[in-house]
Amino acid sequence: MVEKELTPDEVIDALGGCGRFQWRINVVAHLMKTIVAFSISSMIIISATPTWRCADSKECTNLTLINSYNESTSFCPTKTCTIGNSSCKNIQFDEGLKTIVTEFELVCDRDFIPSTTMSIQIAGTLVGNVIAGQLGEIFGRKRPFFFAVVILIIANVIGFFANSWIVFAVCRFFVGLAAGSFMTMKYALLCEFSLANWRAWIIGFPSWPMQACVLAFLGWLIKDWRYIQIMTAAIGIPCLIGWWWIPESFRWHVAHDRQDVAESIIQHVAKVNKKKLTNTDHILRKLETDKKDKKHTVLDLFASRKLIVVSLLLALNWIALGIVSYGIAFGIQALSGNIFFNLFLFSLVGIPSKAIAMWLQNRFGRRLTAVICFIAVAVGGFVVGGVQSADAPNKDMLTNIFALIANIGITTAWGPVQTMTIELYPTVIRTIGFGTLSVFGRVAAMVGPQLVYLDSKVPGVMYHVIGAIGFICAIGSLKLPETMGMDLADKIATNNKVSQKSETNNVV
């Protein structure tokens, strides 16, 4: 029973902390993320290059004859753009998997297009992060969140009908734009209804790797890039029902001095959680700040010395997330073995690793967890880089094992880095901060597919880069403030002190 004015965190605590309402919006939001996970991860399958040969010679169309020859001495070697002194004019792909590469013959002098298309998708994500960060500050979290789902549905449907790789690439730009908007809004929206001890679980819950595992299985069944897209679009339609289940963030209304609207949302949460509040008029304490409510911009991320340090160090971590995650993900195509099994395996290990990361964050803190994750990235990267550069014995096996270790490290690192990003910025600039730092990650992510392309020319170079980035971020993360157990701040304070439970609800 509440009989005094409260801060937003005290209100959440009075409403039960983690009740039926919090469970409901988290389940709905993580289920909605399926369309995002499918849209982004499907590019690993959609842009894959199946085995192919030059079919200029009639003998090269006879698979029985081809298979009777040793591959190294065959007159029809795989992935060879010239026969003698002549350039190949007819490409023959192995039957089975249908991708944009087989559809538009993106090999030889066009082999850069798949990685470029991936980079275009990431560029869209970058734009989405920028737009969502500012829209989240101006219009709230809910409307950009659901609008992103609508864009994903439309972009996947248009992609299904794409008659050229250029049209497809444009569709992937909008897929990335919507995905960036969705993820920026999702974490802010969910965390602003939760207490500190639950945020690591909300952000780190392994819904993405679970969804990627399902995608690997469905992709193996479908094996057609067009139908993978239409399936993804169909998944998005039920997501729109969530509009009636997820309200606007009451903290956003509080941060913009709309206490009356915030209190109506609180009453809704109380009803769902079966809690009763008395004296509901002006239940929320007016936040103390020397500044009147204003429209905030990216410049506010550097409003104090501490914010400058935090923003720069977090930007470094986001750069690592981008390069390493997309480099390893896109590099799955080049690993030995079946692409669907590799995608399933690399996604599967993300489930227990994220669960462990959630436990570590609540046990030892966000900062130490991030350091451990980046050390794993560094070890895996340096070992794979060395093995490939030296062309060591058992290269394929060692590459798969230590690439998997680096993947576990970077998959796990997303949790503490995203959690710290949410917790270190106040509500008035939270989505701006998350969106802006995501931009650093997306710019870096555009480098990932290009590193894979370069690695095909100079073996080992991508993983040497990954190892170096992991080492640098492990050192840098030690300088970040610990946020475990800290209340979320709502406005930028003027006292340059990070909010603790005993202080006002302001930050830096």
Image (cartoon, grey):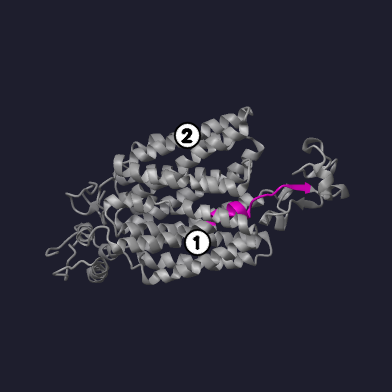
Q: Is residue 45 magenta?
A: yes
Residue shown at the point (30%, 64%) measured from the top left: 21
Residue shown at the point (82%, 41%) measured from the top left: 68
| Magenta region, residue range | 40-53
Q: How dense is the environment of label 1, judged by Cα within 10 Å: few (below 14), some, or many (20 and up)?
A: many
Report x, y in % for residue 26. 36, 60
Specify the quadrant of the image occupied by residue 165: bottom right
Tell which tag, 2 or 1, sits nearer the viewer: 1
In the image, which disc is placed on residue 35? Answer: 1
Residue to which mark 2 is pinned = 378
> For the view shown, which residue lies furthest in the right direction?
58
Question: Do tag 2 and tag 1 residues touch (Cβ < 8 Å)?
Answer: no
N-term-proximal mark, 2 vs 1: 1
Q: At numbered mark 2, what does the secondary structure look like: helix, strand or loop?
A: helix
Report x, y in % for residue 138. 36, 65
Q: Amino acid at mark 1?
A: Ile
Answer left or right for 272 relative to 337.
left
